[in-house]
Amino acid sequence: MAARFISHCGARLGRPNLHSLVWEGGHLLLDCGGPRAPLDALPSPPDAVWVSHAHGDHCGGLPDLFGRAPGARLLTSRITKALLPFAVSEAVGQKARAVPWRRFVDIGGGARLLALEAGHVPGAAMALVEIDVADRSEPIRVLYTGDFCTHELVTLSGAGLPVLDGRIDALVIETVLAADAKADEVEYESEVARLREVVAAQPGPVLVGVTSVGESTEVAAVLEGVGKVVLVDEFLRPLFEAVGRDGEFGDRRRMREHLATGGVVIAPGDQLRAHSSGGRLLGEIEEDDTARVVVLNRAREKTPAGRLVRRGVGRGEGGQAGGASVSRHLLINHAPRWQLMAMIQGLAPRRTFLVHGTTGARWALKRALEGGGYRGDVVVVEEGEELVIGEDQIGQA
Ligand SMILES: [Zn+2]
Ligand SMILES: [Zn+2]
């Protein structure tokens, strides 16, 4: 008896992650991103849902899911459970059962799940699912990485290469940075050092726009001890508390005052989008020659961060144009291509399912793996496609 993997959504980049692992005894949902996850596509109500981490594209669909399948169990790491009230809702947080690190827990239907640290953001976890099947000597093994990275962050260890008793039948792996050549060259420690130097040397105010879960606590830790008072948006206080980190917090008025006196402010606002806290504060300092705007990671073209980076890296530094200096720092928390290759080649699963990346990037990674001597089957997953796991080994019991 084989198992099946179906990616309903999230095989491509920028879509909520919603994948099913189905076998004779059960149906486990792997992530439930939102808000518009196609829950109508599920083959049956799931028995349980595994949430890899507290980013909206992995957990934002949970309220809808529980509206339809109130009996489904919710499994996640302890820290993700603590973050779910912030990321989704109090009710969803209370529903979650925290799974310990590196210890199998029974999930019913003849299956068990092992959570492994994934790096990326606080609480992020990979799930190894083992399913006992009658006609096979070994269980079917599926590893779902969720978002991950193997390099160390300042606040988090990177994911290790899982050491397992047997071979993995299917590895479902994210590929967000698979084709990002710049990310592939990042030396994380150097990026951290450069950001610290830039902030320490700035004569005037510094505004850092961050994503809430992950970047905010990481940047606060990076900037510890730079010799300036770093103020964090009050909105982020519960998140810092959930992951056990200190900070100095202030509301919008205090952040404005702090910037006016040349302080450093960390405010939520991925790519400093207009409606965000960081986006609103940008207007306060953009024309200030002594100020600096720090853009982290993504800076897509149509966002304020993209516009700033295009127009302004080095602006003010050469002394010609007025206004705030802008710098971009790649504090990446996804695996770049070399880490993806190392993970896949190191684990040598029978089948590798590439998800959560652009189709072009996933095809490029598939070609690189095949050219690099990987002997397993690499699938650029199509949304809605059903993939069989474990069939090749049936009859070898
Ligand atoms: Zn994520
Ligand atoms: Zn993601």
Image: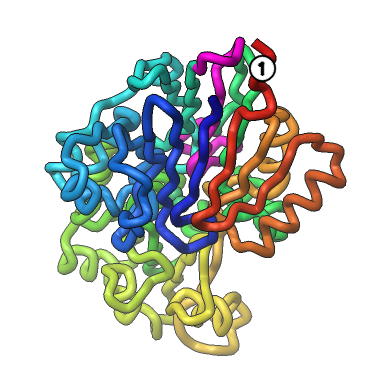
At x 56%, y 24%, the residue is 141
- Which amino acid lies under the numbered mark 1 shown in the image of this protein? Gly
Position of the N terminus by quadrant: top right
Q: Position of residue 118 (x, y in %)?
A: 50, 34
Q: Which residues are magenta?
A: 133-158
Is residue 274 at least partly visible in the picture? Answer: yes
At x 48%, y 66%, the residue is 295
Left or right? Give the position of 374 relative to 340.
Answer: right
Residue 137 belongs to the span the image colors magenta: yes
Residue 282 belongs to the span the image colors magenta: no
| Image label count | 1
Picture layout, residue 152 above or below residue 200? above
Position of the C terminus by quadrant: top right
Tell me which colouring the rendered structure shows. rainbow
> Dot 1: within a 10 Å radius of its alpha carbon, few (fewer than 14), some, or many (20 or more) residues?
few
Left or right? Give the position of 303 relative to 72.
Answer: right
At x 72%, y 59%, the residue is 181
In this figure, which residue is indicated by the disc labeled 1? 395
**Element carrying mark 1:** loop
SS majority, magenta: loop
Is residue 225 at least partly visible in the picture? Answer: no
Q: Position of residue 296 (x, y in %)?
A: 49, 61
Closest to the observer, 323 or 132: 132
Closest to the observer, 349 or 111: 111
Residue that sits furthest to the bottom in the current view = 321
At x 27%, y 68%, the residue is 277
Q: Position of residue 395 (x, y in %)?
A: 66, 17
Closest to the observer, 38 or 202: 38
Picture layout, residue 169 above or below residue 298? above
Q: Position of residue 169 (x, y in %)?
A: 63, 28
